[in-house]
Amino acid sequence: MNILVINCGSSSIKAAVINAHNGSSVLTMKVERIHDKALITINGTSVDCPDSGHEAVLNFALPLIKKHLGDQKLSGVGHRVVHGGDKFDMPVLIDAEVENVIKNVSVLAPLHNPVNLLGITVAQKVFADLPHVAVFDTSFHQTMPRRAVTYALPKHLREKHSIRRYGFHGTSHEYVANLAAKHLKADLKTLRIITCHLGNGSSIAAVEYGRSVETSMGMTPLEGLVMGTRSGDVDPGALIHLANEEEMSVYELNQMLNKKSGLTGLSGVGNDMRDIIEKSSDGDDDCRLALQVFTHRLRKYIGAYSAVMGGVDAIVFTGGIGENSSVVRHRSTQRLDYLGAVINEDKNHDVKLSAENPVQEFGMNHSRVKLMAVKTNEQFAIAQETLRIIEEKNKVNTTPTIPIAVSGRHIHLTQEAVDALFGKGYELTVKAPLSQPKQFACNEQVTIVGPKNKIERVRILGPTRPKNQLEISRTDEFFIGIDAPVRASGKVENSPGIKLIGPVGEYQMKEGVICAWRHIHMTPEDADLFGVQDKDIVDVEVTNGLRPLTFGNVLVRVSPKYALEMHIDTDEANAAELPRYSEGVLNKTDGSAKLITKKNKN
Ligand code: AMP
């Protein structure tokens, strides 16, 4: 399962062929000096590129990869895309619509998205027969709550220009949080983790029970921690002051904040933390200050994020600095005892991460908060995500689709009830046939009267049955004042009754009010196909809906009289944000069935 991972950046292009199962690398390629005498290094060998500029270089470099791979097959291509705006909360298979959205959010990342897109366009030409997947730096942070993403700026400007906090480095934060949970033998959904990605670009995230709830980068990767050449947090008033006093232009301010600040601006010796640490121990005061500001800001954020999550179980260090600098880990985690995080200086000093040993703890054994250094691997993470999306797509294409219908409130009546409500010997009339054979929606409707309220025009479904049965949602129950059980259709014993009013008379149902248990109707042939039996209870995973969701406890109902269809009620459809009708596929995995809705384009 080899995946080509492409990271087409503004000043360099990196590509690698990664085994998505074990992370081993089959091929690596790097292109530097894209705009002037581009140099390609592929598996350690340098190749001069005759052209310069992104498009020409990509057109030369990507076919080289194909040539180097020879007979080795690729399963797909994963593209790192910096900005997904608020449109993507997970990786997606690239189609024309996705490309268009990436293009539209380019205004938020003008240096990155256009070149990311170029990488996609050229790779699609060179690897035309493969699926291409976009993996966004922003998507992991799409779970941040409104209060964390909103800047206190005028509403009309925020809305007009999509100004909000998005967060970046999501692939890395998610990857190391998962590795940390695995190391602790705990479910990520039970942990509060602070992940510190400290590299040339740095950011910190609060990962609460598996979801990002805060991160330090904002609308752009400029906010937050001190970085190699970027300032991180700075009072916007200082910039206004500089614009006034120094007459600095927008361009100059941008250059200063992104290229000349951070460790570079503070230290005067450049952006490499190794040099800064060395010079600071030689007594260079600017380098000492750079290290102090860097670690002070980091510690400040760690405190803030443990407050945001109401506590913390693990603090994870990653990225070139986080993985390699015991000095930075020491300075940013000392005096965190009040949080329950106690560093073990020896262990911290001895941290040595490798592909075989990607996680190491450096806290005291009694430290309640685990301190960990974790080796990040964004290429592997992108390869894994790419393969996951491709496999999901294949499932959708190879398993039969089934419709999911949302059933509104309805009632099945006995002939006795029909007689009382519509007149002796009355026959229900057909308004429309239903998907289940011989079933139909009737023209006739009744009013149901509960202790608190009544609901008019409840549709009768025909033909008449041996038992009365009213199927309503929990919201309806609450409204009319009845507490009815969640039951399979037909099981009405000991359920509440209700008064019905028809055009001719009233009828008191003694029992029969239920909230229908979500279920799938299928024929015995369908059941064979899916490997399930009547009364099986399965998990149903809805993917590619508006958001990921799994329905537990779905009842399988098998009869030759049925047609394949899943029924959920209006409450469930609303909660799941499913449209009134969707299609899906069902496949049995590990004893549970999975239902995957087809991509909902609405
Ligand atoms: P990254 O962007 O994650 O590749 O991180 C690159 C940065 O990691 C470099 O610019 C260095 O500042 C830093 N780095 C790498 N090794 C060390 C080390 N042993 N000590 C301190 N910083 C390091």
Image (spheres, grey):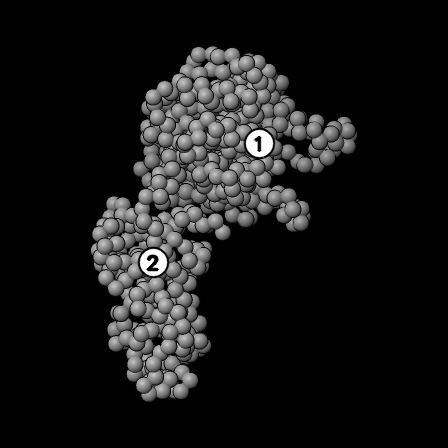
Q: Give the residue number, with chain letter if any, for mark 2.
A: 566
| Position above or below: 382 against 507 | above
- 225 to the left or right of 447: right
Q: CA distance from mark 1 to mark 2?
A: 42 Å
Q: Give the residue number, with chain letter if any, for mark 1.
A: 114
x and y percentages locating residue 306 in the rendered image: 47, 41
Q: Earlier in the sequence, mark 1 or mark 2?
A: 1
Q: Mark 2 belongs to which amino acid?
A: Met
x and y percentages locating residue 119 in the rendered image: 51, 28
Circle 2 crowding by C-alpha within 10 Å: few under 14, some 14–19, many from 20: many
Which quadrant does the N terminus fall into? top left
Q: Quadrant of residue 370?
A: top left
Circle 1 crowding by C-alpha within 10 Å: few under 14, some 14–19, many from 20: many
Q: Mark 1 belongs to which amino acid?
A: Pro
Residue 503 vs residue 515, the one in the foreground = 503
| Position above or below: 213 against 466 | above
Q: Secondary structure at mark 2?
A: strand
Residue depicted at x 54% and y 29%: 118
x and y percentages locating residue 593 in the rendered image: 29, 50
Residue depicted at x 41% and y 27%: 4
Q: Quadrant of residue 151?
A: top right
Q: Secondary structure at mark 1?
A: helix
